[in-house]
Image: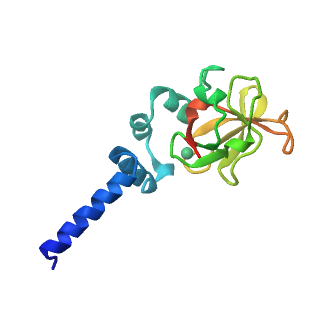
Amino acid sequence: MFTRRDFSIIGVSTLALAACSSTDAETVKEANMSNTDWTNMSENEWQERLTEQEFYVLRKEGTERAFSSPLNDEKASGTFVCAGCDLPLFNSDTKFDSGTGWPSFFDTIEGAVETKRDFKLILPRTEYHCARCGGHQGHIFKDGPAPTGLRYCNNGVALDFKPA
Ligand SMILES: [Zn+2]
């Protein structure tokens, strides 16, 4: 049985926790994310969760307009996470200015993305997507800088940036 005193202690510690986290809404969102079955989410569920533009890119393999994402110019240090499920995909120290108008990286966080061939432009390209939710991120090209020589050409709308 809880005594009245136990209850007040719980009340105080809950308040302290709430004060440490950024916002209640964000806490709820994060809790929901960890319990989500990402691979079995329906199209409707994705549509509710994402903005129209995020849905178009992540779930329909769309491509945003070049130079349309503020993340193209993001130079702060931090982590770029999947806009669909929050999985960390890129560290800022692998980002470079490719001049293409899309956020570009020469490497991913290990195991964060999976690839497949796509023939949308007739010539085969290597598509890559978030390893957790399957959300489309971009394409890999072989004209990137050392040490990988790869360029992960990413849609900015498919990413969220978390400053270090
Ligand atoms: Zn994801």
Above or below, 70 against 78 in this view is above
Residue name at image x 62 percent, y 26 percent: 63
Above or below, 157 against 86 in this view is above
Colouring: rainbow
Above or below, 23 against 98 in this view is below
In the image, 110: left or right of 49? right
Judged from the image, the quadrant occupied by ligand 1 is top right
Residue name at image x 22 percent, y 63 percent: 11
Residue 140 visible? The answer is yes
Query: Whole-percent x and y of residue 109?
Result: 68, 50
Q: Quadrant of the N terminus?
A: bottom left
Query: Whole-percent x and y of residue 13?
Result: 29, 64
In the image, 49: left or right of 91? left
Tell which residue pokes out farthest to the bottom in this image: 1
Residue 61 visible? The answer is no
Tell which residue pokes out farthest to the left in this image: 4
* Image quadrant where residue 23 sits: top left
Query: Whole-percent x and y of residue 9?
Result: 23, 69
In the image, 121: left or right of 46? right
Query: Whole-percent x and y of residue 102?
Result: 68, 27
